[in-house]
Amino acid sequence: MKKAVVLFVTTLAAGVLLLPSAGAHPRDNPFDTTIFAPIQPGGFKVNLETVATGLTAPNKGVLAPGEPGRLYVVDQVGKLWAVDLATGSKTLFLDVGSRLVPLGIFGPGTFDERGLLGVAFHPNYAVNGKLYTYTSEPNAGPPTFPTTMPPGTPPDHQNVVAEWRAVAPGDPVVGVDPTSRRELLREDHPQFNHDGGDLAFGPDGMLYISDGDGGEADDQGAGHVPGGNAQQLTSPLGKVLRIDVNGSNSANGQYGIPADNPFAGVAGALREIYAFGFRNPFRFSFDRGTGALYLGDVGQNDIEEVDIVVKGGNYGWATKEGTLFFFNNGAGAGFASTTDNGLVPQGAIDPIAQYDTHHEGHSVIGGFVYRGSKFPQLAGRYVFGDFARLFRFPAGPNDSGRLFYLTQKNTKPGLRQINELYVPGQPPPGQQQRASTEGIGLALLGVRTGRGRRTLCPRQHQRHAVRKRGSRPAARSRAVTANP
Ligand SMILES: [Ca+2]
Ligand SMILES: [Ca+2]
């Protein structure tokens, strides 16, 4: 009999909703069915536990260096909460809500993909108090990078990465100095959707930033260059960027360009680009064991994918969707096909896992590689999720998220099998006919040990802590955020 894995998830009320796969999908799409690697029940049983309530749309939880008992939760409406894992009480640590564009594309409380989308703590945060935010803000000045917008057409908004400084690291009640803000970069974003927005420091001490293709659909429309922004090396859209927050040799002098960035010496390319060819890389993380960068790239109409991102890699969008060829279909809805479209650049890198959009889920959520020791079933395996099996646009609820893990932990080429974690109280995997009350897609998750010790990925910047029910906090677990 398999040992049950106990996994706690914060299940939080969703008001403003994030989601990247907006729009109807073509019914007669040849791949609108699970024809490859259907997701299998994994045999693991996990329990979910609420660790914080009263948030609107939490999209990430992260530990600050030196503060294992406190989970910092990013709420899309602009609030960064410090959640005490022993008591569940939360403290408003930073509020950037007034900087954001008004959220809710059909009015307050409806779907949106903009907002406060990412936070990363400086590796030396315990000493210097520095943290970084990714926010969707009104147009307020020249962008750092060349715009893709046609002359005279303003972007929908600008996405901004800024630095802040905590007054007293370790004491969230004191909070962040509001005058400490330093803007690192600002980019024009054509539409409201596909904002990416995750931030994380790599094992190399560099800040990595994920950025979507600019929105709309099929990487087409106003502000999308011919062939798509994701393949365009003069644009930050559809990329993973890599910068040195301690440096100053960028064009605006507000950050540094790592000398070994793959396009640092390529004329005409943005020196900040680390990898490209993404649609909406909503969440990513670094494997504490190997340093590998795992990323969930949300698909268009057919395929959700997980990538291992390497320096200079091209992940194919919008010439591929998953392992298939992508056709933007002109003014019609794009689709994936096995028929070669003749557009795929040489060396484009396929995902390590993929599943069917609309049949298995709607939006892949990047996760983390489990590096704890208590649960050998998960050791070295990538744990991640999907936003919502049932997507109700535009006002939700989208509360039928799923939790997955990859069976294979080796690096052999080819697609890896996806398994689903079984959550008691929910219909068995494959039989979820209606939305559950557990908003896994809007969850922060982590695994604890049976004795309340943390087990997942200690001392990693994206780790998350979780609380054992009615007990002391799991001190050093780590997790993932689930949300597109
Ligand atoms: Ca791809
Ligand atoms: Ca199209």
Image (tube, helix red, strand yellow):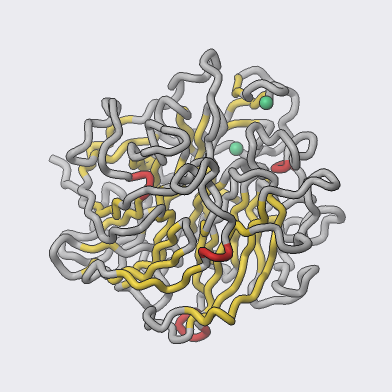
Q: Position of residue 144 (x, y in %)?
A: 76, 62
On the rendered structure, is 28 left or right of 256?
A: left
Look at the picture and state if 119 lies above or below 50. below
Q: Residue at x 22, y 54 (%)?
A: 49
Ligand 1 quadrant in view? top right
Say if residue 322 shows up in the picture: no
Q: How many marks?
A: 0
Furthest toward the front, the residue is 107
Q: Position of residue 66 (x, y in %)?
A: 39, 78
On the rendered structure, is 74 left or right of 423?
A: right
Residue 262: quarter of image? bottom right
From the viewer's side, name the closer residue of 100 and 116. Answer: 100
From the viewer's side, name the closer residue of 361 and 96. Answer: 96
Q: Position of residue 131 (x, y in %)?
A: 52, 73
Q: Residue at x 55, y 69 (%)?
A: 132
Furthest toward the top, the residue is 28
Say if residue 291 shows up in the picture: yes
Q: Can you say which quadrant of the picture contains the N terminus?
A: top left
Q: Residue at x 44, y 62 (%)?
A: 462
Q: Residue at x 37, y 52 (%)?
A: 380
On the rendered structure, is 28 left or right of 431?
A: right
Q: Position of residue 229 (x, y in %)?
A: 73, 42
